[in-house]
Amino acid sequence: MKKKTTENGSDAVKLAVVGVGLAGLAATAYFFLGPKGKKHQKDVKSWAIKMKGDVVEKLEMASEISEPVYREIIDSVATEYEKGKKAGHEEISALAQDLKKHWKTIGNLAHAARRDVVKSAGRVVKKTGKGIASKK
């Protein structure tokens, strides 16, 4: 039997992308407003804010978020910033290492967002009576 995707399937994908974006924003907010937020606010320079924004954008575009994917995104953005001479190698490396330390928080947020998306998609399917796979 062939599986066919309905409009509800694409809605679930859209919800997943929104959920990942919210997780990225929550991680950024945690960085600036969390327990060490005051210190981070003082230390951050404009290039660092842009770098974090680029990381969040790439996280939003990623189809799946796992620790290796998260680390790869941070490394690729850091490499771009080093090539563009936005800041010194030491500063960029320090920020990249700091961002990598926050994986546990971001991973938990991404997992929670994914769980909420699956739950919402299930409600939509039940409400409309249409499933993702149809049987003949």
Image: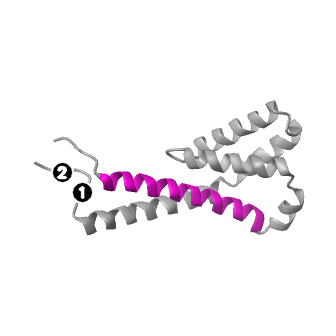
User: Which quadrant of the view contains residue 120?
Assistant: bottom left
Residue 33, image x, y percentages: 76, 68
Q: Nearer the viewer, residue 76 or 13?
A: 13
Residue sitting at x 87%, y 52%? 45
Residue 129, image x, y percentages: 22, 64
Count neighbours of disc 1 (C-alpha within 10 A) and say few if under 14, some if 14 to 19, many if 20 or more.
some
The residue identified by callout 1 is 131
Residue 106, image x, y percentages: 62, 57
Check residue 134 in the rendering and tell me which mark sits there, or answer none: 2
Q: Residue furthest left?
A: 136
Alpha carbon distance from label 1 to label 2: 6 Å
Q: Is residue 30 magenta?
A: yes
Q: Is residue 108 visible?
A: no
Q: Nearer the viewer, residue 93 or 129?
A: 129
Residue sitting at x 85%, y 39%? 86
Q: Nearer the viewer, residue 6 or 90?
A: 6
Q: Say above or below: 40 vs 61.
A: below
Residue sitting at x 85%, y 67%? 38
Q: Is residue 42 visible?
A: yes
Q: Residue furthest top?
A: 83
Residue sitting at x 23%, y 59%? 130
Q: Is residue 13 left or right of residue 29?
A: left
Count neighbours of disc 2 (C-alpha within 10 A) and say few if under 14, some if 14 to 19, many if 20 or more.
few
- State the extent of the magenta-drawn residues as a range: 7-33
Q: Is residue 13 left or right of residue 107?
A: left
CB within 8 Å, label 1 to label 2 = yes
Question: At numbered mark 2, what does the secondary structure look like: helix, strand or loop?
Answer: loop
Check residue 95 in the rendering and tell me which mark sits there, or answer none: none
Q: Say which amino acid is labelled 2.
A: Ser
Q: Residue furthest front?
A: 7
Q: Say which amino acid is labelled 1.
A: Gly
Q: Nearer the viewer, residue 74 or 21?
A: 21
